[in-house]
Image (cartoon, rainbow, N blue to C red):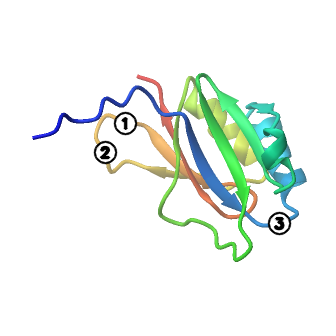
Amino acid sequence: MTAKPRLLRLDHVQIAVPSGAEAECRAYWGGLLGLAEIPKPAGLAGRGGLWFRLGEAEIHLGVEVAFRPAKKAHPAFIAADIAALAQRLQKAGRAVLWDDAIAGRRRFFTEDPVGNRIEFIGAQ
């Protein structure tokens, strides 16, 4: 029997975006959510898209030619003040759908500017 792999941490999550959506994604992920944009490696820069950092993990927005927004699969982020975040998103015209399906977890779903599902969970 072989040993189980020893995974250390999550490096990044990639989210698909359509070609040409960089400006609106930069405004959402960097501006509205406040993530730090990081440069893509030179060998990948010509492919379009954007990269952001959150703590030790990264969010990669990669251009997909036959783009379709992810309506089920999604990243989930822990928010220090989930109510304030929901209000900020709503003031920016983003829909916020609260969900109480998991007892003890205050959370909501929204969509990024290209229609991908995003979840936010209140810090406990």
Q: Position of residue 31 (x, y in %)?
A: 83, 37
> What amino acid is at disc 1?
Arg
Alpha-carbon distance for marks 1 and 3? Answer: 35 Å
How many residues crowd mark 2 within 10 Å: few (<14), some (14–19), many (20+)? Answer: few
Q: Residue at x 83, y 66 (%)?
A: 19
Q: Please provide percent x and percent y for residue 93.
A: 78, 53
Q: Residues within 10 Å of mark 3 (few under 14, many from 20)?
A: some
Residue furthest front in the image: 1
Query: Which label sits on residue 105?
Result: 1
Q: Residue furthest bottom?
A: 66
The percent position of residue 84, horizontal first and vertical second, equals 65, 30
Question: Gap between marks 2 and 1, in whole Å?
Answer: 6 Å
- Using the image as rendered, state which of residue 39 and residue 77 is in the foreground: 39
Give the number of the mark in front: 3 or 2: 3
Say above or below: 32 vs 8: below
Residue denoted by label 3: 19
Tell me which residue sits at (57%, 39%) in the image: 12
Q: CA distance from mark 3 to mark 2?
A: 36 Å
Q: Amino acid at mark 2?
A: Ile
Q: Confirm or deny contact between disc 2 and disc 1 (CB under 8 A).
A: yes
Quadrant containing the N terminus is: top left
Which one is in front, 77 or 20?
A: 20
Q: Is residue 68 left or right of residue 37?
A: left
Is 65 placed left or right of 84 in the picture? right
Residue at point 56%, 32% (across, down): 82
Report the residue marked by disc 2: 102
